[in-house]
Image (cartoon, rainbow, N blue to C red):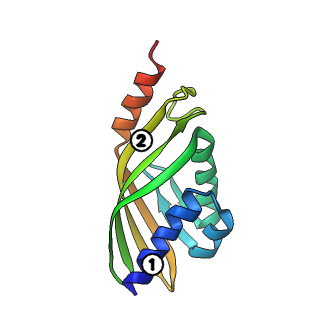
Amino acid sequence: MSNNSQALVERFYYEVWNQADEDVARAILTSDFQFRGSLGMEHNGPDGFITYMRSIHAALGDYQCIIEDIIAGDNRVAAKMCFRGIHRGPFLGVAATGAEVQWAGAAFFTMREGKISALWVLGDIDGLKQQLAHAAAP
């Protein structure tokens, strides 16, 4: 089962996040999916997550989630991540700068019945805020 869990997480990042594929999100997330992102926001269900995903893609063009390392068990997966994009819209209170930003993070998944039922993401938001402040400085 751990290979299936790892493949599901890889699909979540490569197809859902990196390609913004909402149909895949609805197919691989449970109806009661619980999401807590680095920005502290909590969202429930595929549609709640999709709303959040749209907001991130609106703020960060060419947004990509890169898996650097992954550990998979039967119903749990942890991934070391790199997130990056081009700051093209308001984000964390900073107007678009056009700067490329990237930050490190970790993601912790729970699986149920072959789908992702929960995700908790921790990211280096302080480092991201510093990059945005530096890019916005005159």
Residue drawn at (35%, 64%) of the image: 79
As shown in the figure, which amino acid type bears the numbered disc 1? Met
Residue nearest the observer in this picture, 6 or 90: 6
Question: In x, y percent, where is residue 137?
Answer: 44, 16
Single out the mark in the foreground, 2 or 1: 2
Question: In x, y percent, where is residue 63?
Answer: 54, 47
Residue 102 — which label?
A: 2
Q: Is residue 124 left or right of residue 8?
A: left
Q: Is residue 19 left or right of residue 13?
A: right
Q: Residues within 10 Å of mark 1 (few under 14, many from 20)?
A: many
Residue nearest the observer in this picture, 75 or 43: 75
Residue 86 in view: yes
Q: Is residue 67 left or right of residue 115?
A: left
Residue 24 — which label?
A: none
Marks 2 and 1, the one that precedes in the sequence: 2
Question: In x, y percent, where is residue 126?
Answer: 34, 37
As shown in the figure, which amino acid type bears the numbered disc 2? Gln
Disc 1 marks which residue? Answer: 111
Question: In x, y percent, where is residue 73?
Answer: 33, 80
Residue 39 in view: no
